[in-house]
Image (cartoon, helix red, strand yellow):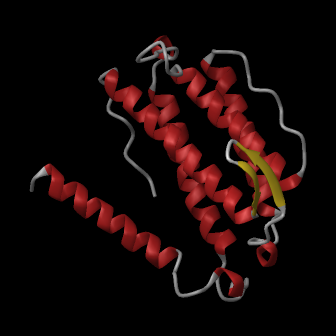
Amino acid sequence: MNRRKSLGLLGAGSLILAESAFPRGIPVKRCTSQDYNFNKAFSERWEGLRLHTFEVYKAMPDTQFNFQPTPEIMSFAKLFSHIGVSMDYYTEILDGTPHEEEIKSIEKKAILTYLQERFDRFENALSKLNPMDLYSLKHKLNTRDGELYSSDYDILMLAYNHTVHHKGQATTYLRLKNIVPPQYRY
């Protein structure tokens, strides 16, 4: 099977899984906790993301932890501290508790602890979200495009997408160091 066809099948499989997990037939306005338990589905997928993120993190040897493919982009260490501080900002939006400053250390164990604490804090906020209020536009955000109102759902999707994006970058960093990345988790 050629690479293009394989990638196409992978993409189609992802769409099928996403469609079964997040059906389109239920309009956002009519979702209820009885009809559709988004919080539970999201938490299950977030757990897979968390596990794989830490597997990718741990795959980079300590001696290569500050690897930076080019001077313009973040080092491997900075990539993960950035994931952590971003999760802290998302948590602040969701539950109102102030974020902590991004860790300055570039030591692998220190960033690991920081990242674990940021995941825990985000998951604590997630566990307290009201599924009946998931789609209310209650968070006022100032973006480069102006003022924007977002829901808890929007913030969760932003957190998931952002984490996946940077985990994917980290996987590329591993490949550049001839390290086979951990197998993908769902």
Residue depicted at x 69% and y 65%: 153
Residue 155 picture location, percent across and down: 70, 56
- What quarter of the picture does the N terminus occupy? bottom left
Q: Is residue 19 left or right of residue 129?
A: left
Q: Is 108 rendered above or below residue 44?
A: above
Residue 149 picture location, percent across and down: 77, 60
Q: Is 114 rendered above or below residue 129?
A: above
Residue depicted at x 55% and y 38%: 54
| Residue lying furthest front | 146
Q: Is residue 73 left or right of residue 183?
A: right
Of residues 15 and 64, which is closer to you in this image?
15
Of residues 116 and 158, which is closer to you in this image?
158
| Residue lying furthest left | 1
Of residues 49 and 15, which is closer to you in this image?
15
Residue depicted at x 66% and y 25%: 111
Residue 47 picture location, percent across and down: 59, 55
| Residue lying furthest right | 97
Of residues 58 and 71, which is closer to you in this image?
71
Residue 132 picture location, percent across and down: 79, 78
